[in-house]
Image (spheres, rainbow, N blue to C red):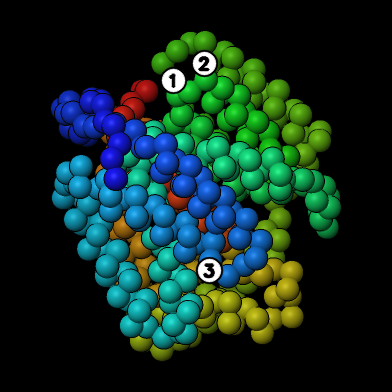
Amino acid sequence: MRGSVSLVPIDDGRGLSTVDHEVSLPLWLVLLGNLAMGASLWLIAAGGMAAKLILLGVWIAVLCCYGYRRRFGSSFLAGALILAAMIGVIATGSGANLEKLRLIGNLLMLPVGLLVGLTIGRGSLRLMIPVLVFYLLLSSSFQMTHEGLRFNQPFLFLGLFALCSVARWRGHGGLAAASGVAILLSQTRIAVLAMLVNLIGMIRFSRAMTWLVGGIALAGLGWIAALYLPRLFLTHGSGRLAFWHDFWGQWQGGSTGQRWLGFGAGAVEEILSGYQSFASFGALHNDHFRILFETGLLGAGLWLAGWSVMLWTVRHARLAICILLSVMLTMVTDNTLNYGHYLICCGMAAGIAAREGTEDG
């Protein structure tokens, strides 16, 4: 598999300028990759693991072909060891094998995306953005819920916004703005907050015009949202707090082994399925707590260590840090680990931003 390369300067995080290769993927791979990504997107509605297997398989295959061109440092080794240990905790813990595989696959999405962005750079956007835009154009619509009319696909739009934040082709700003409007119309509060965190990484705060225009724009958007998107300002937890309190009590009441090694992959859904309100609530809506509950203190420690390594790896790029922090934020009140395409997109965007050593001050 061959692709052209060009030299680009890279900030190595210590203020030193190094040289890396910008990968230009061959046309046949771009076309094949778009077809594969399209298949994975259309399989989302079917449920199951097929969509994620295609998504993860394609990007791992691309990494295997191009990864040798980049030299990874000690942070990569540390991250690989932490991920291997986490997989070991899940694999040796309780729970059905299918649930173990599902959780392991979900955990791989963000680091794989990050490696893709670091290894390939903006060339990877050609495999994701076109088909993602096409899919969203065909599948997005307003849906009536018990909380009013809301636009669907907020996390796919959030992933597209992240990709557009590192794109440099003509029209990427307009596409990012359109994605932002779609996220606002979804009235998904955590998605809007994550978008704002991502946006912080894109803004050049050293420019006076930024503060003037940004302040006026933010005030205008806030006024419009208060009038037409009231759900964004509601403070209710949609029943989450009661479930979190219940699961916290169950974790505290567990055996010593369960507190240290967890209740096993899939335990959250299994327990929730016995609740009368499971059909409407669906899941725990807190991935950080879910990791603690299903993998215990040992897994939670590895989870935090993995996040620390990823943030340390991209520490020289404010935009990359903000993208990763936005993902962490969504995991506080949503089931982000289940959103494979969103995680891949954010990982790629963070990797691209870190690869370029973006530092806007």
Q: Secondary structure at mark 1?
A: loop
- How many residues crowd around disc 1 within 10 Å: few (fewer than 14), some, or many (20 or more)? some
Q: Residue at x 37, y 83 (%)?
A: 93
What percent of the width, then of the height, locates residue 176?
58, 30
Nearer the viewer's eye, disc 3 or disc 2? Answer: 3
Position of 189 compared to 89: left or right?
right
The quadrant of the image that shows the N terminus is top left
Quadrant of the image for the C terminus?
top left
Q: Furthest-top residue in view?
A: 209
**Of the residues tagged 1 and 3, which is closer to the observer?**
3
- Residue labelled with disc 2: 210
Question: x, y (%) of residue 158?
Answer: 57, 42
Give the residue number, with chain letter if any, for mark 3: 49
Q: Earlier in the sequence, mark 1 or mark 3?
A: 3
User: In this view of the protein, can residue 67 be seen by the observer?
Assistant: yes
Numbered tag placed on residue 204 in the rendering:
1
